[in-house]
Amino acid sequence: MDIRTLKPADLEVTAALLYRSFESLASAHGFPAPWATEAHARAVLERYRESATGRVLVAEEGGAVVGVGAVRLRGEVATLGPIATYIQGRGIGGALVDELLLRADEAGAVAQRLYVDAWNPAAYALYTGRGFGVVDTVVHMERPPAPGPALESARGLEVRAFEARDLVEVQRLDRKLTGHDRPEDLGTHVRLVARRRGDVVGYLGAASAGAAGDAILLGPAVAVDASDLFILIVHALHAGEAGSQAWSAVGRSLRARLSTTAPAASMAALGLGFRIRELGVVLSRGAPPPARPPQLYSMDPEIL
């Protein structure tokens, strides 16, 4: 088996591999695939391949691609995934993970993190066997289309649309609370910023998803406390009512991966009409996260 860097000519076959592998495994446990189509899976691979800090590798046997995996460096933290193989139990996934971890180490990463669905014990065993440990339990939530609650007093919190001039402060808060250094991701995904007495205390990212853009994926989102995080989410439920924002959550279902480190967060989410669909875990190897703030993880499904 050979492991090499993904080439443009590999995109069609690796997108099909990525989509079908996750779709087959998820559906076997009664869950939807993380990508609606092969085209969406291809877009993920293309984005990681084109990123200045990303690497996408393929495993090849007899001239045929049998596995694909990605890693991205965000400061001193490397995030792994997605990783998929055509055949389980033959060591293909393990060989890809080992090579991705080697690339991360060579790039100077002091920690590696990833997300694993709770219904995927084989993946959990693969990573824990390489020194990864659980640092967070995650609830994967969904909210059907419905009006949001009234926008009331926000405890001195000012929430407004993200602007380019906010990026430096958002990045500083994000680095302090998560340990990531990811200006490219934040500049692309962040939609709302929360300030208190002029200081940034939270942000919320969002993106359209689904075959027809009929859902909104919330995240990444980070706040100093859980109340601020949910004020941001309430504002997201109203985003677009007075304009034509492309990510508008009005009239569309919402999906999010919520950290359970703040005990009141899950109760607050249920109170907003979210329902828990499945569970997952965040695994980390190396230096632990500096803190575990109230947050929504990315829905890529690579953890951000």
Image (cartoon, rainbow, N blue to C red):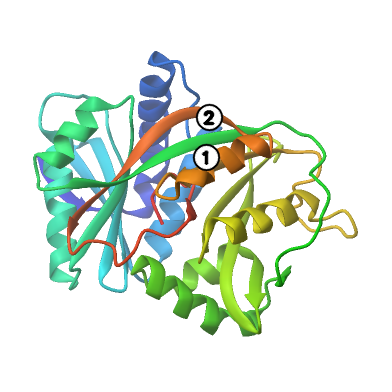
User: Of residues 262 and 29, which is closer to you in this image?
Assistant: 262
Q: Position of residue 64 (x, y in %)?
A: 22, 34
Q: CA distance from mark 1 to mark 2?
A: 9 Å
**Quadrant that contains the N terminus:** top left
Reading the image, the residue beneath label 2 is 276
Residue placed most toward the observer, 84 or 118: 118
Instruction: State left or right for residue 78 relative to residue 235.
Output: left
Q: Seen in the image, is 159 located left or right of residue 86? A: right
Using the image, determine if residue 262 lies above or below residue 204. Answer: above
The reply to whether callout 1 and callout 2 are in contact (CB within 8 Å) is yes
- Image coordinates for residue 143, horizontal then vertical, percent: 66, 34
Is residue 289 left or right of 292 when viewed as pictured?
Answer: left
User: Residue 77, which numbered label?
Assistant: none
Residue 266 marker: 1
Q: Quadrant of residue 106?
A: bottom left
Tell whether 98 sits left or right of 41.
Answer: left
Q: Is residue 150 above or below residue 85?
A: below
Seen as rendered, the residue at the extreme right is 242
- Residue 114 placed where, x, y %? 30, 49
Say which amino acid is labelled 2: Ile
Q: Residues within 10 Å of mark 1 (few under 14, many from 20)?
A: many
Q: Residue at x 61, y 61 (%)?
A: 228
